Image (cartoon, rainbow, N blue to C red):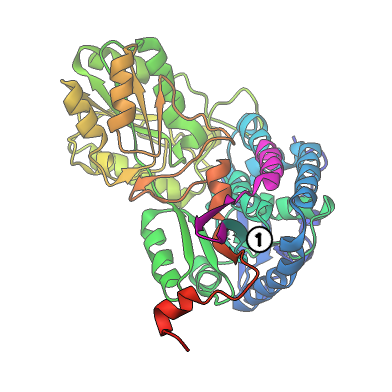
Amino acid sequence: MSNGFQVQDRFAEGAQYIGGKLLPGTSGRHHDIVNPATGESVLRYELAGTEDVDAAVAAARAAFPGWSAATPGERSDALHRFAAVLAEQADDFAYAESLQCGKPVKLSTEFDVPGTVDNAAFFAGAARHLEGKAAAEYDGDHTSYVRREAIGVVGSIAPWNYPLQMAAWKILPAVAAGNTIVLKPAELTPLTSLMFAQAATEAGIPDGVINIVTGAGKDAGEHLVGHPDVVMTSFTGSTGVGKRVAEIATATVKRLHLELGGKAPFVVFDDADLEAAVHGAVAGSLINTGQDCTAATRAYVQRPLYDAFVRDVAALMETVRLGNPFDASNDLGPLISHAQRDRVAAFVERARGYARVVTGGEAPGGDLAAGAYYRPTLIADAAQDSEVVQSEIFGPVLVVLPFDTDDEGIALANDTPYGLAASAWTRDLYRANRATREIQAGCVWVNDHIPILSEMPHGGYKASGFGKDMSAYSFEEYTQVKHVMYDNTAVARKDWHRTIFGDR
């Protein structure tokens, strides 16, 4: 599945998109985008340096007055055209996403690309609903109201696991609200972010509104976060890097939006539909080869179902087909890189010393040996304070632990620093209500795990960060609030001044 899409030709002019043009980087350092399914280079490009970041911020700053002054209807129309262009180019986006990430093309085709088009359509509508508060008289003859306004140039940093969707989640609400943006995608996976910006230009969004700089985090990323003309930073990635982003942003008092790590609990009560829970656990833990902050990573199963759950999940995992991401009959692709595969494998090898590896726990050989593949892995009987329970592995690994009482199950679910997502599996309305109320996470599914919607917020509690992606809540993140107050008397008011200064 290439549909004539040629990466080398598409990005021959460079992998930076600044002011509506593809440009080469200026850092003097090059990077290879590698197909993780084969280990082969897809594109060699020059990384962005600090000069490229400065140029992108300048382009965004220059575009801000015109874009922020556009009417909501004009921005909405542009975003509707953008959604249409994205839909027209869906096959190219799906191909490029799977090529650079190694994810099954059916995931790109059925989830990533349609979700991105839907996000664009949602924020096209949201652009016309940038509401303040109605006018009212709160102080005598004064009328007050609240305006919501665009904030300026946004600097965003996106991860490698969902590069297209993360570009959409960061760019769309920002530009719908009238801001301009500079996005730094991960060096490993910049292709679809660049294509996203090009599609925006094709849709008629003005040059400079959306800019992409593809560089290393230590120079391009940190320079973007610390840039004095960037008024807000939005970052998605690990909690450790998020702390560094917050530290840099504090120096210039930037607004921050952080979506950080996750260690989602999957709580199965003893009245749950076992078959549904088993299928939910396998799908929820293996989505995107487990490289998903909301993936099910810790299954807590009430003891009457524990043994059957471990048995059935292991059996179902063993039927999962690994292989070429462009073969639609395969279920799972490789991890993003050999380095990530080795990191996941090291977690599992250390776990053998204190837990039971029920299935998986190895890289396949044969035709898949050249890629960054790793078999779906189930680990049982680990202690709650063990590494595989507490740390984010970011691979196709599910850990299962038993619990006895409902109190214990919910307490265990909350017993990590993270709080991005969770799920509860039960047929009891009261148990479900309690779980959704007491589990500390930004999203709690009941009898499902993973679905997301453009209309609903996505974001974390605790060390999983703060701020929301998608939904009207996300839209408001990219605005600032202004109180406006009018004196309605049409003559100079002296009473208030006398209160402060006396008669003069």
**Magenta span of residues:** 116-144
x%, y% of residue 22? 77, 64
- Residue placed furthest toward the front: 503
Residue located beneath label 1 in the image? 179
Which of these two is toward me, 129 or 267?
129
Task: Report x, y in % for residue 350.
Answer: 25, 43
Along the line of sight, the residue nearer the viewer: 467 or 426: 467
Secondary structure category for the residue under label 1? loop
Q: Residue at x 27, y 17 (%)?
A: 269
Q: For residue 386, what is the image quadrant?
A: top left
Can the viewer see residue 83?
yes
Residue most extreme to the bottom: 504
Q: Is residue 227 above or below residue 311?
A: below
Q: Quadrant of the N terminus?
A: top right
Q: Amino acid at mark 1?
A: Asn
> Within the magenta stretch, is there residue 126?
yes
Residue 322 percent across, percent down from the top left:
52, 29
- Indicate whether 22 appears above or below 446: below
> Is there any visible trace of residue 310 in the rendered image?
no
Q: Position of residue 441 (x, y in %)?
A: 35, 38
Describe residue 83's horizontal placement relative to residue 29 as left or right. Answer: right
Instruction: State the residue in front, 249 or 165.
Output: 249
Numbered marks: total: 1
Task: Classify 483 as above or below 109.
Answer: below
Which residue is found at the position 76% from the left and 36% from the top?
91
10 Å crowding of disc 1: few (<14), some (14-19), many (20+): many
- Residue 228 falls in image quadrant: bottom right
- Relative placement, left or right, of 463 versus 73 is left
* Residue at figure coordinates x 48%, y 89% from the top left: 504
* For residue 6, side relative to residue 152 (left or right): right
The residue depicted at 43 percent of the width and 71 percent of the height is 248
